[in-house]
Amino acid sequence: ILSQREYEDLLWKIKNIPSTITGKKRHNLRTTFKKKLHEHELATKYPPFELLKFEQLFINFRTTDSTLIHLIDQIKSTTVFTLDTGSVLIPYQPNAAALIQVQIILSESVSSVELIEMCHLPRAYEHTFTLVKQFFQALFNADNNIFIWGNINELHSFCSYNLFTYDQLDLCNPINLQNAFKTHWNEQHPHQPTTSSASINYSDLAFELSEWWDKRQTTSSFDIGLDPTLYHFNSAEIEHRQSLIRYAVYDCLSMQLIMLKLKLIEPQESNINPSNEIVAATLNDITDMTSDDDQHDLPATNNFEPISPTDIQADSIPKRQQTLTKAERRRIHNRTSTLKQRKRYYKTEIIISNIDRRFTTKEIQGIIKSYGVPYSAANFSTSSTIRKRSVHIGMQKSSQINDYQHRIDHLFTTSPFNRFINGRRTNK
């Protein structure tokens, strides 16, 4: 809600847009001001959004296997879900897919809201990634009722993350809650012009629910890593993330309110209750690597190599190996050994995002060594949506990881790269 001074200032700005601003820019500025004014009017007219009982979890590379197994069991215990997505605005391009919100409705008053951070997933060869795929496989079951505000096609842009396929989306049972609300609204308000799906607005929802929630974060930086345990954030960064988390969660909870208002779901009892212990499990406590590990450098590659779930689980299928040739068994053994080695190297890691793409692995390894940071491996990953590069540094010890990260987390942007190249030329 705006203060009285902010409200009066906004009214003045709407009436006094400079004459030097013309055309589309003038129209966009006026629209922005009016939207902000409309938000204020709704916040003044209606009480704040009243939360239903829920727990909220993140799914990303920090999530433990036990947490995902618990969530898969929750999905199998019910048939009612809400689903929404979050995207990142990229000028002159389609919005980048960044976040999927899934609400598992266990009963009328108890639910679990999962925020799947698509830009911070486990690496494809890790077993955790396989469990995330199983999470969506259980969700997109034809027997489940998945309520979504719009069309299931908005998930098509997320298929590039390889967690689910177009075929799975075609076989699931989505229910367009926007259409259901449109029908209800037109029946309840026959004196008003017929409302189309496209013209359903926030005022209609606020009027129907007699509640208000902030909708200003529709296309925001949902790719930055919302989970506060992902990286090291200052208080301002944490506060910004909390506002995005609140928005993402409220989107699902508001759909549940609409479903109850429209009597689209009946009260149901769940076989599984949400456990508060799961929240602690998502922290995925960092443990020390064994002290006898030697320092190794993995071969330089541009990205981590995706490995199929079959490869990940190859060492747990002894019956199948009996029918394989000697060469096939050796190949499976080698891949399994490589996976175990990678997991050991990256058991504790530092991830530095938005690095200069011109750095090579050897250059980064040399810089890390020069700052006295004991590491076991270093390699790159690249975001499939915004094409930003990150370096993953496996650490030998976790006891001083904060100190080590502070030493090197500023060394791989464009300015340090230019200084690095100039220094190398001078030495020649």
Image (cartoon, helix red, strand yellow):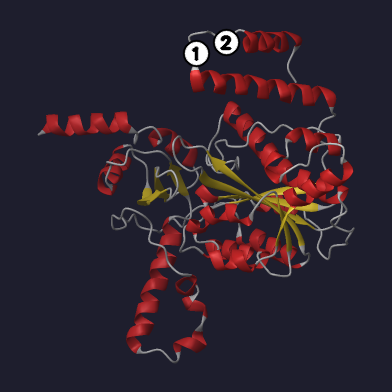
Q: Image quarter for residue 139?
A: bottom right
Position of residue 414 measured from the top left corner of the image (x, y, whole percent): 31, 32
Q: Image quarter for residue 188?
A: top right
- Mark 1 residue crowding within 10 angstroms, few (<14) / some (14–19) / many (20+): few
Query: Disc 1 to disc 2, how far (Cα)?
Result: 7 Å
**Residue 381 in view, yes or no:** yes
Q: Is residue 288 above or below residue 42?
A: below
Left of 68 or right of it: where is 89?
left
Residue placed at 77% from the left, 55% from the top? 275
Question: Hey, what amino acid is under mark 1?
Answer: Ile
In front of the other: 259 or 291:
259
Question: Hey, what amino acid is under mark 2?
Answer: Ile
Q: Is residue 241 above or below residue 21?
A: below
- Mark 2 residue crowding within 10 angstroms, few (<14) / some (14–19) / many (20+): few
Dot 1: element: loop
Numbered mark located on residue 17 in the image: 2
Numbered mark located on residue 21 in the image: 1
Position of residue 323 measured from the top left corner of the image (x, y, whole percent): 44, 92
Residue placed at 55% from the left, 33% from the top? 233
Residue placed at 32% from the left, 85% from the top? 327
- The quadrant the C terminus occupies is top left
Left of 231 or right of it: where is 103?
right
Left of 120 or right of it: where is 190?
right
